[in-house]
Amino acid sequence: MKLKNIFLFIMIALLLVVGTACSSSNTSGDSEGSEDSVTLKLAHSGSDSHQYNIAAKKFKEIVEEKTDGSVKIEIHGNATLGSEADVIEQVMDGSVDMTTVSADSSFANTVPEMNVFGIPYLFEDREHVYSTLDGEVGKDLQGLVDEHNMKGLGYWEVGFRHLTNNKREITKPEDMKGLKIRVQPAPVWEAHMKALGASPTPVAFNELYSALDQGVVDGQENPLPTIDSMKFYEVQKYVALTAHNYSPAIVVMSNNAWDKLTKEQQKAVQKAVDETTEYHRETLQEKEQAIIDKLEENGVKITEPDRDAFREATKNVKDAVSSEVPEDLINRIKK
């Protein structure tokens, strides 16, 4: 009898251990209560000093602190996981967890309404930009992301865009005639350059430096921090401060990755995105004058063109995206 009792006791103990293990396994994916650690891959196309990476590093710091390390961020910059278009596809299919990308670049081919940020001179200044992004318009645009197996989390900064080239000074729209200008792969950018008499040439961002260096294109347009971080000043002689567009860096996460997080982790990630936005805006604004000084020290000629003339020359560019960008959206931003 004693041997039977011992055997019975052992069997009960084993069943209890197995049951506990199964219970633990079942709750590990529960979005309400899991404490399992999660590692999220955040991919972008910028260099180590690019705006994308400045934000990504700050986001990593904040989210890991807020979650006590239960959410870790693995940053893959320099387009190591593919071009912007590639990574957007990977976020949608869940093979990459997160990305930050200029909203009016390849991303506009997935969410066409983002072409609105390619419309020239839509924003008056930074205050106008931030009130738009942080208000109902920004939230509505984020909501459109949810239709593509992604979650829109917010907007970091790319900045106000300026023209560079290796041929001549730009002070008026006529100076753009015949220049081959690299554009982002979206219809609004092709229309923009054609309106200025330039020849729009799509080039992937991670291939842009070599395209400028080899003369595939004469110039490009990007914010000052991008011109600096990607060292475009090494292969461009002229910068025209046109401030023709503002590009936000939209932050998106795969729904698959979002659903892996507990409710508390989701709140922490969202809060980290918001805090990074504030930090990013302040940091980049502080850099701009120093970048201008650096460009001049490197022999770059900087001009301040007649922006009113550029605004007039490009006033009909919005018509090129009328089928993607509702007139009501444009009017809401203008107001």
Image (spheres, rainbow, N blue to C red):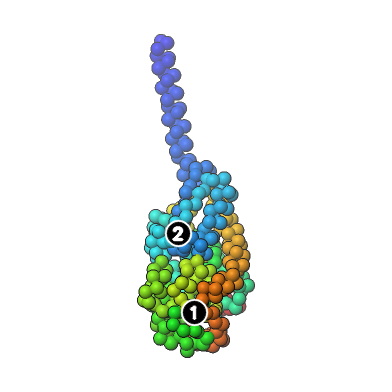
Residue displayed at 43% across by 35% down: 22
The answer to whether 150 is drawn above or below residue 298 in the figure is above
- Residue flagged by tag 2: what amino acid is it? Gly
Q: Which residue is painted at 39% across and 58% down in the image? A: 81
Disc 1: CA contacts within 10 A as few (<14), some (14-19) or many (>=20): many
Q: Which residue is mark 2?
A: 77
82 lies above or below 268: below
Q: Which residue is mark 1?
A: 238
Q: Nearer the viewer, residue 303 or 154?
A: 303
Instruction: Give the mark count.
Output: 2
Task: Kindly state the secondary structure of the residue where label 1 is placed.
Answer: strand
Question: Quadrant of the image for the C terminus?
Answer: bottom right
Q: Position of residue 189 (x, y in %)?
A: 44, 78
Q: Earlier in the sequence, mark 1 or mark 2?
A: 2
Where residue 268 appears, as percent x and y from the top left, is 57, 52
- Tell which of 71 and 171 is nearer to you: 171
Say which residue appears at 55% left-offset and 71% top-offset. 294
Image quadrant in which you'd find residue 17: top left
In which quadrant will I find the N terminus? top left
Q: Residues within 10 Å of mark 2 (few under 14, many from 20)?
A: many
Q: Is residue 204 visible?
A: no
Real-space CA distance between mark 1 and mark 2, rounded to the nearest whole angstrom = 28 Å
Specify whether 280 is left or right of 174.
right
The amino acid type found where label 1 is placed reads: Tyr
- Say which of marks 1 and 2 sits in front: 1
Across and down, in percent, residue 267 comes to 57, 52
Looking at the image, can residue 81 be seen? yes
Examine the image and state in which quarter residue 177 appears. Answer: bottom left
